[in-house]
Image (cartoon, grey):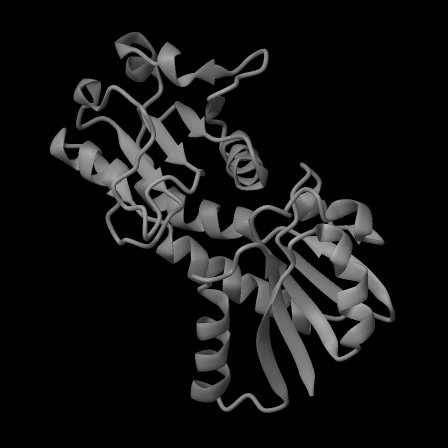
Amino acid sequence: MKILGLVGFPLSHSFSKKYFTEKFEQENIAGWQYELFPLERIEELSGLLAKNPLIVGLNVTIPYKEAVIPYLDEVDSSAAFGAVNTIKIQGGKLRGFNTDVYGFEESLKPLLKAHHRAALVLGTGGAAKAVASVLARLGIGCTYVSRTPHEGQFSYKNIDENILDTHTIIVNTTPLGMYPKVEFCPDLPYEKLTDKHLLYDLVYNPNVTTFLKNGKKQGTHIKNGLEMLYLQAERAWSVWNEEF
């Protein structure tokens, strides 16, 4: 038996276990199982692995995509920007990858237009870093937006019509609006959005968040994070099944 799992906290609304359990059943993949491993502190990771020697791979979610890196033996180039969401365990070594970058890039590219030259990335965590790395590779300038911005970042109160005119992609990497707190959304002047804007929300539950609803009212193009989630999950499966 080979065990895969998800580490993070909390894990009450995880997509991953359902996805992989169904995948194993539908594709007749025997000898694998996927479990949830909620860790209140990332320091618990070593103990988890010691108690579960059959674990060969892990997904990593909030809030540990950055904090997990010191516990790894190697970091793949896909995660060189400083965030890991997939771990492969082989020969006692832990190697970190980022499959979010693949999922986001492949789901974003079909939506891009010539006027999409700059983006606002809402949030500054591991998912935001993955998004920013993709945008940079695609030649799209981006600026982080944070409640407590550092140099070179915007605060939400800075966002005005002039900034929105030049930043026609807005990506929400925060959990705002995620079920069950569906009424919440990033604090933006949505009335200044136009049909030139593309709003992408990494949240997938609900299907259309308040962030996306507010954009749609202004005629923006919208995209949720479900396709990205499927793509990154399949990429993780490939990582776990490749030899290095």
| Nearest to the observer: residue 120 or residue 111 | 120
Q: Quadrant of residue 189?
A: top left
Count every numbered label the image shows and give the total: 0
Q: Is residue 154 above or below residue 98?
A: above
The answer to whether residue 184 of the structure is visible from this angle is: yes
Q: What's the residue at 39%, 43% (across, down)?
A: 109
Pick the front one: 181 or 131: 181
Image point (34%, 39%), residue name: 200
Image quadrant in which the C terminus is located: bottom right
Judged left or right of residue 115, residue 68 is right
Q: For the N terminus, give its image quadrant.
A: bottom right
Vertical position of residue 76 compared to residue 167: above or below: below
Where residue 137 sits in the image (x, y, percent)? Answer: 55, 34
Left or right of residue 197, residue 204 in this image = right
- Confirm whether residue 244 shows in the render: no
Q: Which residue is found at the position 39% from the left and 49% from the top?
A: 107
Q: Residue at x 52, y 16 (%)?
A: 153
Counting from the top left corner in percent of width and height, residue 75 is at 77, 49
Front position in the image: 201 or 117: 201
Q: Nearer the viewer, residue 242 or 131?
A: 131
From this view, report whether residue 132 is shown above or below residue 94. above
Left or right of residue 110, residue 92 in this image: right
Percent from the top left, x then y, of residue 190? Answer: 22, 24
**Picture quarter containing residue 4?**
bottom right
